[in-house]
Image: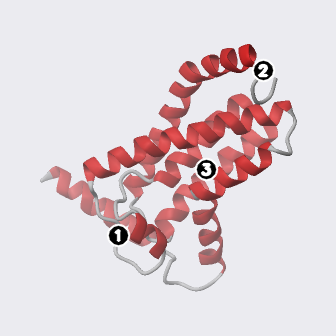
Amino acid sequence: MMFRRILELDARLSSQMRVAEKPGLLRNIAIFFAHSGDSWFWLAGLFIAWFFSNTFWKHWETVEFFGILGLAGIVLMVKFMVKRKRPEGDWGDIYRNTDPHSFPSGHAARAFLIAVLGTVLAPPWLAIALWVWAPLVALARVSMGVHYLSDIIAGAILGIIVGLIGLQIYQPMLDRLFAATGFLFW
């Protein structure tokens, strides 16, 4: 009973945030931010940038790239365990057709993972920009009707946790591996 009430409140609040059916500037901004967290965009961008970067940026790009890949596996696993259907709507056919499940939001998880990793690995100006960008991506996903509010909250928490754990476990391991082999950026 209580869980059902929470889900109803979640659906009602999410519906109130929707701009997907309302043409105008706010909708266009939401579309931009909703797409700016796409995994293909980030993976392709990081891969291409790596070829033109110096040592500092190659390190950041490599950790972000593999962090995004690892997180994607975790998000998909949770989505297929929970199997929560996306909100009804017309916008976002590519997301609705390739991934019918909404919980947790992969875009929110990815955006917050990128911000966490950026906080440690990127210059302060970029870290600040990423922390402004991440909640905008998450909120845009609700605004465009492809997620519920609880999806993006869970996604943000998951992205932060995976980012922090990843930095504690994998960053030192990657540093040792790359230092020993001279691979990628040393």
The residue where tag 2 is placed is 182
Q: Residue at x 18, y 57 (%)?
A: 4
Residue 58, image x, y percentages: 78, 35
> Which one is nearer the viewer's eye here, 184 or 156?
184
The image's mark for residue 87 is 1
First of labels 1, 2 by sequence position: 1
Disc 2: CA contacts within 10 A as few (<14), some (14-19) or many (>=20): few
Residue 11, image x, y percentages: 32, 65
First of labels 1, 3 by sequence position: 1
Name the front one of labels 1 and 2. Answer: 2
Q: In this rendering, would 4 be left or right of 94? A: left
Give, as a three-letter code, the residue at label 2: Gly
The residue where tag 3 is placed is 134
- Secondary structure state at the residue bearing disc 1: loop
If the image is split into quadrants, where does the C terminus sit? top right
Q: In this rendering, would 156 be left or right of 55? A: left
Q: Is residue 186 above or below residue 64?
A: above
Q: Residue at x 39, y 49 (%)?
A: 76
Give, as a three-letter code, the residue at label 1: Pro
Give, as a three-letter code, the residue at label 3: Ala
Q: Is residue 143 above or below residue 129?
A: below
Residue 147, image x, y percentages: 41, 63
- Secondary structure state at the residue bearing disc 3: helix
> Which one is nearer the viewer's eye here, 63 or 134?
63
Residue 139 appears in view? yes
Tell me whether circle 1 and circle 2 mark residues in contact (CB < 8 Å): no
> Which one is nearer the viewer's eye here, 29 or 179?
179
Tell me whether circle 1 and circle 3 mark residues in contact (CB < 8 Å): no
Disc 1: CA contacts within 10 A as few (<14), some (14-19) or many (>=20): some
